[in-house]
Image (cartoon, helix red, strand yellow):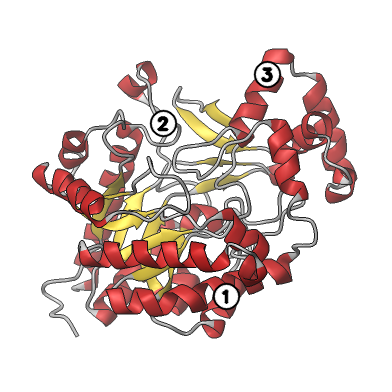
Amino acid sequence: MTDPSSPVLMTQAMRWFGPADPVALRDIRQAGATEVVTALHELANGVVWPLETIVARRRMVQAAGLDWRVVESLPVHEEIKRAGPDGPGWDALIEAYADSLRHLGEAGIRVVTYNFMPLLDWTRTDLAWALPDGALALRFELAAVAAFDLWILRRAGAEGDYTPATLAAAERHFAALDEDARLRLERTIIAGLPGSEESFTAAQFGAAIDGYAGVDAARLRAHHIAFLRAVCPVAEAAGVQLVVHPDDPPFPIFGLPRVVSTEADVAALFAAVPSRANGLCLCTGSFGVRADNDLPGMVERLGERIGFLHLRSVQREPGGAFHEAAHLAGDANMAAVVSAVHRVQQREGRSIPMRPDHGHQMLDDLNKRTNPGYSLLGRMRGLAELRGLEAGIAFAAKG
């Protein structure tokens, strides 16, 4: 038990996409973070991360007065997700992943984030949705997804995945789009977002979906468990915790299953692979899209396995839409979430790394080139708000 006069606080980090990121390491340090979370984004999926490259990148970060101890992300190759242990490339892909884990552990990395979403990482339909104050936010609209699915992708059987109300809204949405808007919608959904693992044309995406024929939720979950059983022993030996990022959005999309969407999904994963190296990146935005996910309760019940936090809030809208709210607004109940995190940290005597996620594009950043969701000032505002919230909670807890 830690001394209550010196509470354990979250480790404050920001995501950094490497030397080409328009947000510099100096900017992140001035924002008040002490660490970055990053990855070797220049390397293709399935390639072993060389030890010397990892060490050089960490030294670059440390030279700027920060540190790098959380990877986001080490991608899981699509063939591992799609074909599982019966796939012809399984052994080589698993060994490459294991080698990367060994190298990361040797370089001092302690947390490795990954996801198990088929084909797409996080998905949005608008990257610059105007808020009433003039800032820009990321937004997801189910009607826009359905419009793309039905009349641009033309996926066979897509009509059966949507309600009559969504189909009608999708038809209206598509009819209102000119050619440029239709192309922009296609690029937004499948051309790749910051940190995403793949990008596609519509034809390539349709073919990739066909490659998942016969892979339902049960099979994808089995492949996920097989992956963890293969790599968790390596992670344990390397002193690394693997943390899975939840599905974003947390429901099936384009006919593809998703299996890390609820607390029950995560609990089942932990029960199947009880290794301490099998952990969770709790993203309050991804889980928070679903009203049936009790975010503070999830922190309390899953806390000992949470190795990394993405703190953001979404505002749920009618019809399956949502947008990124301010960090202390929206549906997340961030005060209750951070209070639960504080209790876990004091109970376990450890600091959990966190980062503010998906900030609004605002102020001077409206005039700059930015990665969608990862401009500096919106995330700096979020980090400052979260820092103040945690300080207030810690002060009140001291009585």
Using residue 96 as the reference point, say whether residue 217 is left or right of it: right
Q: Residue at x 65, y 74 (%)?
A: 222
Of the residues under marks 2 and 3, which one precedes in the sequence? Answer: 3
Of the residues under marks 1 and 2, which one precedes in the sequence? Answer: 1
Disc 1 target residue: 226
Q: Position of residue 210 (x, y in %)?
A: 78, 48
Of the residues under marks 3 and 1, which one precedes in the sequence? Answer: 3
Label at residue 181 = 3
Q: How far apart are labels 1 and 2 at the CA level?
A: 34 Å
Q: How far apart are labels 2 and 3 at the CA level?
A: 20 Å
Q: Position of residue 62 (x, y in %)?
A: 12, 48
Count residues near mark 2 (Cα–Cα under 10 Å), then give few for <14, some for 14-19, many for 20+: some
Question: In the rendered image, which quarter contains the N terminus?
Answer: bottom left
Above or below: residue 348 compared with residue 290: below
How many discs appear? 3
Using residue 174 as the reference point, say whether residue 372 is left or right of it: left
Q: How far apart are labels 3 and 1 at the CA level?
A: 41 Å
Q: Residue at x 22, y 39 (%)?
A: 28
Q: Residue at x 46, y 79 (%)?
A: 301
Disc 2 marks which amino acid?
Asn
Residue 303 in sight here: no
Q: Residue at x 30, y 69 (%)?
A: 342
Q: Nearer the viewer, residue 368 or 215?
A: 215
Count residues near mark 1 (Cα–Cα under 10 Å), then give few for <14, some for 14-19, many for 20+: some
Q: Secondary structure at mark 1?
A: helix
Q: Are marks 2 and 3 in contact (CB under 8 Å)?
A: no
Disc 3 marks which amino acid?
Ala
Q: Within the image, what quadrant is residue 380 found in?
A: top left
Label at residue 371 = 2
Label at residue 161 = none
Disc 1 marks which amino acid?
Ala
Q: Are marks 3 and 1 in contact (CB under 8 Å)?
A: no
